[in-house]
Image (cartoon, coloured by chain):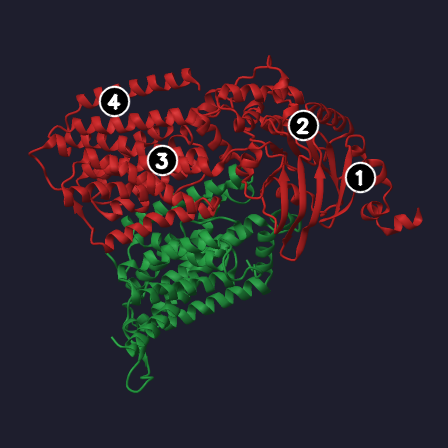
Amino acid sequence: MDALQYLENFLQSLVAGLLMGAMYGLMCVGLTIIFGVMRVINFAQGEFMMLGMYFAYFCFAWFGTWAFFDGLWFPFVLALLAGPAVFLFGVLLHRVLVNAVTGRKATQLEAQGHYAQLVLTLGIALVLQNGGLFIFGSTPVSVANELSYSAWEWGPMIGDRVSVFVNQAQTISAVLALLVVLIFGLVMARTRLGKSLRASADNPDAAIYMGINVDKAHRLAFGFGVGITAIGGGLLASNAPFTPYIGTEYVIIMYAGVVLGGLGSIRGAFLGGLTIGIVQQVSATILPNQLQNTVIFVFFLIIILFRPQGFFGKKDRTA
Amino acid sequence: MNLSGSRKDFLHIGLFGLGYLLLALLVNNSYYLLIMTIVPIWAVMGLSWNLFSGYSGLISFGHAAFFGLGAYLVALCMVVWNLNPWLTIVLATLTGGIAGLLVGIPTFRLRGHYFALAMLAYPLALLYIFEWLGYQEVALPMHREAPLAYMQFENQHFYIVIALLLLVTTLGITSVLSRSRFGMSLLAIKLDEDAAEAAGINTLYWKLLAITVSAAIAGAAGGFYAVVLLVVTPLAVFGMLVSAQALIFAMFGGVGTLWGPVLGAFILVPLSELLYARYAADFPGIQGVIYGMAIIAVILFAPQGILWKLQSLLKPGQIRMLGSTASVADFSVSQDLLVVTPQEHVSPILAVSGLSKSFGGLQATNDLNFEVRHGELLGIIGPNGAGKTTLFNLLNGFIHPDKGEINFRGQGLLKQRPNQRCAKGMARTFQVPKPFTHLSVLDNVVIGAYVHTRTKDEAGRHASAAIQIVGLHDQCDMPAANLTNKELRLMELARALACAPTLILVDEILAGLDPDAMQDVLEVLRRVRGLGITIIIIEHSMQAMVQLVDRFVVLDHGSLLAEGIPDIIMRNPLVIEAYLGKKWLEND
């Protein structure tokens, strides 16, 4: 391989990294909302992403045959709809289970309930992923359409060499991911709802005295968090095949992004996810494909060991 | 040493092993025998997790890393070099231990959430590395010609014997360790790591020891698991479910207990195996669902596990925790145990020069210089935010100064960790008391005494002496959670005293006390001073201090404002201005 070939590979993986990274970033935002408002590490976040993926998959399988839903846009709409669907599920789950070890209940538990929360969400993760095996089956599936196999070509940039192919489905997904993050950022910054969420995050006791229903704020935050991650999952579903076990590897990817961006910061989480996407794709040009995830995990360990407070958005604690 | 307690454990362990073996001999169905082999292996994994996470409170989501390394080591050594499992399980144990140490050294920089998350990354990284290396499925070669050497017995009962040996050994190790200083130190770390470090416990050492032993046990369990199942895949040994199972068995049965993890494994493994055998065709993930639901139920209904729940139902009000059962007060001891002898006099006992520390733009301590004479009672006063507690944190080593020197009894201190400073004779109390609320008052104080004593009895004597000095002998068997504010502060003082210090840093011990209680505490402080112990006390209000101290050091905005005897300090215009503002001076 010559230098131009390397350049092409590098640019290609950089673009792929940016596109994947935007989807990771969206999922990281979901995770960081939950941490930011509730101070809870949700171990089952990967499983909510998985639910988003299967939501998109099954709706596609059921309705995709109707002429009206024939369009190439349909999988993307389904991905966005996965948000509200999983939001409802999250709110329900918070009311039934999560609430027992978070919020005001947490103060009565050992270590502010941190261990109880970690272990409870681990239990939820196990039930969802193995229950998913029962309900969804273990055969890898995906929501692919023509766009997943189509690309725009940039270039050739130097003479007749160095062309970068930009996957169309990924590009649309990345743009949608960015839009969702921006809209949610606006909601948090501008609306009454956002204010009550931020107030509950900042000082739960003071928020109660100000007449904010902190329990409800936590429930909503949990719902938004898992819903937003589910949208990310829905967008990823058109990208590669998946099984109910996919959550575990993504939970590390998400935490890597969130910790990188500084736990609790929305902008930081998005930038963190973006960085993880780039690291993952660019490392694949040097290292064997199977080690992609190992690179992420090692990268995650390095960040968490040497800079646990993260790199971005330290002052910008929007959530 | 609590020999009787350990002996009782050994008796129980022996009886349990025999009973299990007899039961196994009655069984002939090969499927049930396989389950009876796997159950002890998972019990060992539960114990391994418990020995580290259960006692220290640091949640590990990564025990699969050690288990998997053990399993692959045994499998690959047999495939490549034909090494027999007897040898390689020993190697797997060593490998596990080394891996534990290597994981612990960097990862113990983290606490809480971060620690748990980081631990998750190790086995998952290894999982992909082993897949990449091409070990998707390693089958152990058959050696029917030498069943004994290669642990490939016709008769499955032999496997159960080996599994039981592993389990019994692990139980023995857990029993001995949990009743020794190990158990007490980890418990202290679990309850409050800072307080433990300040009480002279070398937290890093104990955590490293715990993870090394725990990981070695996990390595052995993984090694034997490979022998039993004959096939090793990355997902089966490094997968999330392995770490989760270890955690779930321990938490389900009872965190930080000897028998809890065993109970958890003995209930959950057969349950999930039998259901799996029956319903696997329709419901492939049934094991994971059962484990998940079991742990959710435990968190909701019995957060410490079944054994603790049973104990609280059967014997309500009892607060004994494992590892702390042996402390008995001995009030016949003389308080002279804690007297600072004249040979130990070094003056000045403490010299601080050029000490500076800033947090971002805030100069918390600014070029401080002062000395403390031996036997002195020095008061450090100053308005809110003057940098008093920061000064104590610098002195006892919780934070490092940007510049400056701290000289304690003629030695520089800057390179020493807080526990080492405590061992050298510098103890402290906290502004917000940091009691170990689940422990009795005596056990709280015993932890402090461990620093300089070799045995639990000796620690008990020192603790008893300290409790007598502060006058808490009537409360010594109460859980610390039941103490009044004054008693809590006195217990803090006793805990510091039990370290046999030459210098005690006392942080706002009078805050929030009513006048009577304040007088009692002042009296105790005078008594402590009578033992020849030097005291530096931080206080907010000057009034109480004037009756007590020999000399004041006044801080304002991190700088030394004035120092001298109370009479002079009280009339120093700079001090009055700092406390009451310029207006006051002008009106006066």
Q: Amino acid at mark 1?
A: Gly
Classed neighbour count for the residue bearing mark 4: other residues with Cα under 10 Å, few (<14), some (14–19), many (≥20): some
Residue B101 vertical placement versus B149 (above, below) = below
Q: Residue at x 42, y 60 (%)?
A: A27
- Chain coloured green in this rendering: A
User: In which chain is the residue bearing label 3?
Assistant: B
Q: Mark 1 = which residue?
A: B564
- 2 and 1 marks in contact (CB < 8 Å): no
Q: Answer yes or no: are tags 1 and 4 on the same subunit.
A: yes
The amino acid type, in three-letter code, at marker 4 is Tyr
**Marks 1 and 4 close (CB-CB < 8 Å):** no
Q: Colour of chain B?
A: red
Q: Is residue B303 left or right of residue B148?
A: right
Looking at the rendered structure, whether the residues under marks 1 and 3 are on a common chain is answered as yes
Residue B34 lies, in percent from the top left, at: 19, 32
Q: Is residue B90 visible?
A: yes
